[in-house]
Image: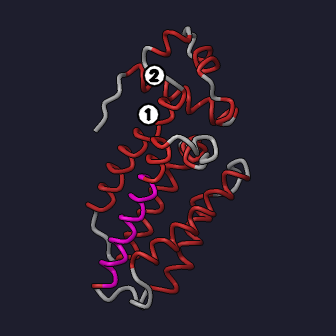
């Protein structure tokens, strides 16, 4: 697990605030240094580049996500569906609290040619896929979900639906209710797979 200094966290928080306010395309080391009332060389002592700041943001989010999801999974839930609802509520809530991370995750075009950033975004998606696949496998084994579709394929369908919901929320300028819209999508899928 990567450790960040207090100053690095402060810089990442300022980057998040700038992305929230002005969009990811307006994140430059020059603007960020001005926001923090630092010189650019002082900023470069903590991060070598804008991409390194974005990489830090994604790494920080992944660490937080693993901890948060582990917390959800350690709680007891009546059914696999209830656990899945809690997992998604937690993830969509995190996006609502930190909408800038969504801008970073959905900015594939900005770092399309940066393997490290692409790898971090893939790691977030893979993590989500693992959590959901595990939930579906468990629910299928307990007889709570039907077995018409494999756990891996169902996880991909759910993530695809959620990704579209998050993208619509991002495109609306965060005006729609992401948690409610996400719940509606998940409930639709659960109606198809849960055994009553």
Q: Position of residue 54 (x, y in %)?
A: 51, 34
Magenta span includes 128: yes
Q: Quadrant of the N terminus?
A: top left
Secondary structure found at label 1: helix
Secondary structure found at label 2: loop
Check contact, mark 1 vs mark 2: CB within 8 A: yes
Q: Is 160 located above or below residue 168 in the figure?
A: below
Find the distance from the CA under tag 1 to the CA under tag 2.
9 Å
Q: Residue at x 46, y 57 (%)?
A: 125
Q: Mark 2 points at which residue?
A: 47
Q: In which quarter of the image is the C terminus?
A: bottom left
Q: Residue at x 32, y 71 (%)?
A: 134
Magenta span includes 141: no
Q: Where is residue 106 in the image (x, y as percent from the top left)?
A: 60, 49
Q: Is 121 located above or below residue 129 in the figure?
A: above
Q: Is 127 located above or below residue 132 in the figure?
A: above
Q: Where is residue 174 in the image (x, y as percent from the top left)?
A: 68, 49
The kind of secondary structure the magenta stretch mainly shows is helix
- Segment colored magenta: 123-140
**Is 3 placed left or right of 40 in the picture?**
left
Q: Name the residue under label 1.
A: 56
Q: Which residue is drawn at 43% across and 18% down?
A: 46
Q: How crowded is mark 2: few (under 14 residues within 10 Å), some or many (20 or more)?
A: some
């Amino acid at each position: 697990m990567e450790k960040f200094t207090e100053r690095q966290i402060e810089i990442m928080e300022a980057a998040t605030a700038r992305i929230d306010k002005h969009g990811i395309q307006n994140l430059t080391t020059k603007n960020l240094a001005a926001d923090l009332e630092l010189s650019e060389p002082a900023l470069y002592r903590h991060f070598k580049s804008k991409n390194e700041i974005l990489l830090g943001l994604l790494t920080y989010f992944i660490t937080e996500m693993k901890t948060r999801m582990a917390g959800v999974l350690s709680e007891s839930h009546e059914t696999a569906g209830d656990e899945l609802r809690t997992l998604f509520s937690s993830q969509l809530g995190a996006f609502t609290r930190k909408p800038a991370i969504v801008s970073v995750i959905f900015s594939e075009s900005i770092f399309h040619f940066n393997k490290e950033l692409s790898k971090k975004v893939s790691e977030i998606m893979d993590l989500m896929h693992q959590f959901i696949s595990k939930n579906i496998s468990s629910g299928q084994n307990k007889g709570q979900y039907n077995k018409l579709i494999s756990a891996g394929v169902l996880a991909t369908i759910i993530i695809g639906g959620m990704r579209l919901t998050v993208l619509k929320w991002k495109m609306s300028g965060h005006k729609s209710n992401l948690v409610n819209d996400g719940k509606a999508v998940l409930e639709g899928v659960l109606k198809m797979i849960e055994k009553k």
